[in-house]
Amino acid sequence: MLHPTPILKETPSQTAGPYVHIGMTPNFCDITGVIPQDLGKTMINGDVEGERINVAVRVFDGVGVPLFDGVVEIWQADASGNFVGPTAPNSNSVPAFTGWGRQPLSEAGAATFETIKPGRVPGPDGKLMAPHIALWIVARGINIGLQTRLYFEDEAEANATDFVLNKIMDKRRRETLIAKRDGATYTLDIHLQGDRETVFFDM
Amino acid sequence: MSGIILPGADGQLFQRDRDWHPKADTPGYKSTTFRAPKHSLLSLGPTQSEMTGPTFGHEKLGELDNDLIRNFSQDGTDAIGQRMIVYGQVLDENARPVPNTLVEYWQANAGGRYRHKKEGYVAALDPNFGGFGRSITDENGFYHFRTIKPGAYPWPNTGNDWRPAHIHFSVFGHAFAQRLITQMYFEGDPMIWQCPIVATINDKAAIDQLTARLDRLNTTPMDALCYRFDIVLRGRRSTMFENKREGN
């Protein structure tokens, strides 16, 4: 099938820089009174079906230093495997579950999202993908936002047939995307470089 | 309902041109040394998880959210500096406007100083300037805000590097795979061409795309300069048989 080629070029990316917290989480860095609450801080705004979980991420650079000046965003389906649709302008209809979260990384390079466990979503091959959360990481020293995913260790069966995980040829590297469970908290360590470098995507 | 579909054809997003964007590891910008992944990115078409994304129609923006001259004012007076309006259109690669999408921006004050505890530059803080704002694009994809022109800004890197005046932008689009962060520069600034962060981009035309144009006709008499900065997000493919540009 032929496709018309794009007529404009995508605006090139530039690093979010060392002060990304000013722009994305202003209250976190003491710029208060401009907006009431940092956007993406709360993902659940009412009664929502599904298992409540905490998703804890820690991000490290190539020499193990925490990414203390970064920001992580997540995007995921609800418990039934549906994504929140677009909200109309000025609709005032805050979704009970937004599907989207944003957190500044702490001095320890850590952030925790209070969310629900996502349901399964169909993949490009028509089969259901394993439950997963899409992640996007920006910071000083990252020239273009890094895309990766978080999967769940207690979904081994679904993970084994997941479309994306199976595209990772080196099976050991699949482990870099699988969060460990401890009670209601799933933890994923993300390494930008090194022996445990996380798999990042161009999607 | 499972996932939003952008208006028009249900096509894949165009692949990102990674030669147009900066590479991950750019030694002239030293912070990339330990933060650039060494493995190749795994290239996959976006799945439903990346073709959908958050929208913010429900978000109530405050009246001053797009007014950096007033939105952090402590004493009711204006921030200090060269007053200006920055506006532009958010489009996709098919030149189709992207309406109802969130645009966030942040910047240093007129002296080049950021309001941040880790800032090491001696220029004075302006008590009335926070440096953050946001807009949602209108039905034609336009955003606008009022601010002061940021100063040039020194940073260590090789010991004595200076950033050209710039404003940071964060744009969402309607799909998580369209998510973009970039920086806007000012037409005619000679410091653009000596900046190690600008130089992470290889193509001069790509750098030019980050340079806002002075819009002389839209200046406000006795009040504010005006700069235009359009932003292009990834667009979707459509087949020749659905080749109605305006409908894509």
Image (cartoon, coloured by chain):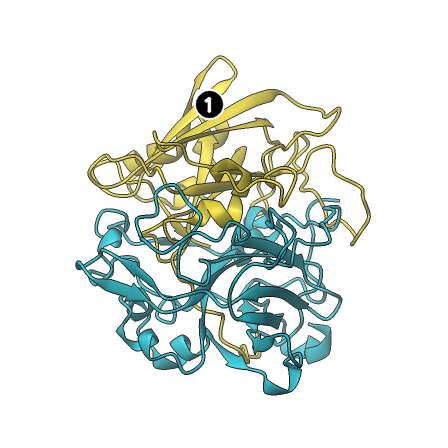
Chain colours: A yellow, B cyan
- SS class of the residue under badge 1? strand
Q: Looking at the picture, how far across and down is residue B94, in whole percent?
A: 60, 75
Q: Looking at the picture, how far across and down is residue A110, in whole percent?
A: 40, 30
Rendered image quadrant of residue A52: top right
Residue topped by disc 1? A186
The answer to whether one can see residue A96 in this image is yes
The answer to whether one can see residue B244 in this image is no
Q: Residue at image x 33%, y 70%?
A: B201
Q: How many marks?
A: 1
Task: Give the camera-side residue of B58 and B125.
Answer: B125
The chain that hosts pointer 1 is A
Task: Give the camera-side residue of A123 and B20.
Answer: B20
Q: Is residue B177 above or below residue A5?
A: above
A135 relative to B22 in the view: left or right: right
Which amino acid does the dot numbered 1 rest on?
Tyr
Instruction: In the displayed orientation, state which residue is furthest to the bottom.
Output: B217
Task: Give the camera-side residue of A178 and A45.
Answer: A45
Q: Looking at the picture, how far across and down is residue A28, in whole percent?
A: 50, 36
Task: Give the camera-side residue of A27 and A170.
Answer: A27
Instruction: In the displayed orientation, state which residue is furthest to the top.
Output: A183
Q: Is residue B148 above or below residue B123?
A: below
A68 relative to B235 in the view: left or right: left
Q: Residue at image x 66%, y 66%?
A: B143
Rendered image quadrant of residue A173: top left
Label 1 Cα crowd, 10 Å radius (few <14 / some 14-19 / many 20+) = many
A167 relative to B158 in the view: left or right: right
